[in-house]
Image: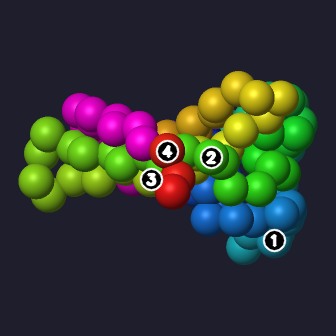
């Protein structure tokens, strides 16, 4: 479930305009509605539906630089503006905690 959530948000950060999920029947006959992924879909759909107006916006009037305290780690940041308010979606692409300092500046 955590990987499904991370990959979905990473796709959105990358500019995906939609997300589709499908399940191929496994060799053992398992079905998706019997896995631990099944309950994640409605929650994830609700989250995406809530932020959809924000992620559909064009580039914001500000720039965000994400600096990690660890040299070999990074995060992805999607910056948007909606109704005059700034929004950030920060995706940790690592498999461990990352400390991030966000620097904001206007787009010139």
Front-most of residues 104 and 34: 104
**Disc number for residue 76:** 3
Q: Nearer the viewer, mark 4 or mark 3?
A: 4
Q: Secondary structure at mark 4?
A: strand
Label 4 crowd bin: few (<14), some (14–19), many (20+), radius 10 Å: few
Question: What's the distance in space between the residues labelled 4 and 3, CA to CA?
Answer: 19 Å
Question: What's the distance in space between the residues labelled 2 and 4, CA to CA?
Answer: 6 Å
Question: What's the distance in space between the residues labelled 1 and 4, CA to CA?
Answer: 46 Å
Q: Range of the magenta residues?
A: 92-105
Q: Secondary structure at mark 1?
A: loop
Left or right of 102? Residue 8 is right
Residue topped by disc 2 = 61
User: Which residue is at a point 70% across and 65% down the rendered structure image?
Assistant: 15
Residue topped by disc 4 = 106
* Dot 1 or dot 2, earlier in sequence: 1
Label 3 crowd bin: few (<14), some (14–19), many (20+), radius 10 Å: some
Q: Secondary structure at mark 3?
A: strand
């Amino acid at each position: 479930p955590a990987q499904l959530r991370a990959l979905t948000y990473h796709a959105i950060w990358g500019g995906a305009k939609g997300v589709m999920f499908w399940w191929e029947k496994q060799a053992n006959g398992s079905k998706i509605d019997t896995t631990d992924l099944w309950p994640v879909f409605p929650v994830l759909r609700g989250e995406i539906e809530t932020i959809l107006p924000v992620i559909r916006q064009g580039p914001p009037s500000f720039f965000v630089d994400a600096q990690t305290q660890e040299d070999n780690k990074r995060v992805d940041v999607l910056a948007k503006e909606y109704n005059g308010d700034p929004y950030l979606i920060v995706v940790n692409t690592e498999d461990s905690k990352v400390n991030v300092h966000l620097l904001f500046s206007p787009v010139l």
